[in-house]
Amino acid sequence: MSKPFVFEKPLGMRDIIPEVVERKGKLLVEIQKVLKAWGYRQIETPTLEYYDTVGGVSSTMEKRLFKLLDRTGRSLVLRPDMTAPIARVIGSIYKEEPFPIRLSYQGNVFRAQEKEAGRNAEFPEVGIELVGEEAPDADAEVITLAIASLQAVEVPHYKLALGHIGYMNGLFHEILADQEKEKEAKSYLQQNNYVGYRQFIQQETLSIDEKERLLALLELRGGAEQLEKAKEMAMGAEAEKAVEQLSELWEVLKHHQVTDHLFFDLTLIRDLDYYTGILFEGYAEQLGFPICNGGRYDHLLGEFGRPAPATGFAIKVDRILEVSKMNLEECQKQVLVTYTAKERSEAFQLAQELRADHALVTLHKVQSKKEKVSITDKKFDQWIRLEGGRE
């Protein structure tokens, strides 16, 4: 009797075949070279974390956490991101380490899916955390490094959208002045539901000027000229400060010579209560999902007893694999050596010599010289038969 679901996997999980694993590994090596060159040291954290320690402060929504219990009954989570575990390390193992701290990472994160929609529940990320360095130079470094990483793996035709959570918060605080209404307005923008956002604003009891300001928020997308428009629309100290910080950041980014890859989007919003300032997302041509994202999260380190400003980014490795133009195929010569028991010693010696010469060698023993071997795998560049002598 066949087992139920014998070929099925849990929702959002997948198998990664060797060819893809090899391509991914090559891509990660190139990105890590760039991160290391900028002074970031790689760290590894556990796949499992305590819910009370990491799960509750993660940027991932509660309903998307994978939860389980250990043998003592304590709640665990599969890490939903890499930032919160690194913050835990900085507040414990690195509590005496002087700031700034620059760390890089790569690893799989886990986020539960409610339904099958082509989204993975386990996916690889590579990124950085810069802790203890103030804006705008730290934000500019992180954004520039994200661009350098995309360039290193030859992602063509990409752009990074820059925003500031304080600008949106400032407008909503001053005009809507109601926490629940602010949350609803943000949820429309987070879902890119601009029709719903417009309808929501139009039905609110607000002045014509206030409605126009909130609706004009949707138009604040484009080049540096958008900062002047944002400044004119700003209401209250919080929104004005956000525009000032974006302007300062832009000036620093000019020195990094990366502004051609950037544009402003003041509707940009991620993870409602997590980010505290500058945030950004990267997009590639012909791909509908962000290939990287990041921003400032100055409140997180305080949760681990070591308050400090912090910023960082994560690159979505699977999405980069879809758009990278870098040659990610195996470049080493692939050789097949077939032999009988009589030629075993010669075959092993030959394989050792070929591997020393950086070839990839596969050995296949045949039962006799008369046995016909049919090799149709195109990955082999050379086939050496030792049954009765080399060919």
Image (cartoon, rainbow, N blue to C red):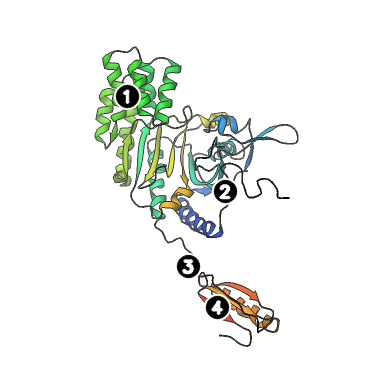
Residue 14 got which mark? 2
- Residue 275, given in percent of the width and then of the height, sits at 45, 31
Q: Which residue is drawn at 36% across and 47% down?
A: 286
Give the mark toward the camera: 1 or 3: 3
**On the image, which quarter does residue 356 sit in?**
bottom right
Query: Which residue position is annotated with label 4?
Result: 383
- Residue 388, given in percent of the width and then of the height, sits at 63, 87
Identify the mark nearer the N-term, 1 or 2: 2
For label 3, the crowd category at 10 Å Cα-Cα, with few meaning under 14, some 14 to 19 and many 20 or more, is few
Identify the mark nearer the N-term, 2 or 3: 2
- State if disc 3 and disc 1 touch (CB < 8 Å): no
Q: What element carries label 3?
A: loop
Q: Is mark 2 on a helix, strand or loop?
A: loop
Q: Is mark 4 on a helix, strand or loop?
A: strand
Query: Which residue position is annotated with label 1?
Result: 240
Query: Which residue position is annotated with label 3?
Result: 331
- Residue 192, given in percent of the width and then of the height, sits at 39, 32
Q: How far apart are marks 1 and 2 (CA)?
A: 46 Å
Q: Residue at x 49, y 48 (%)?
A: 40
Q: Distance between the residues labelled 2 and 4?
A: 33 Å
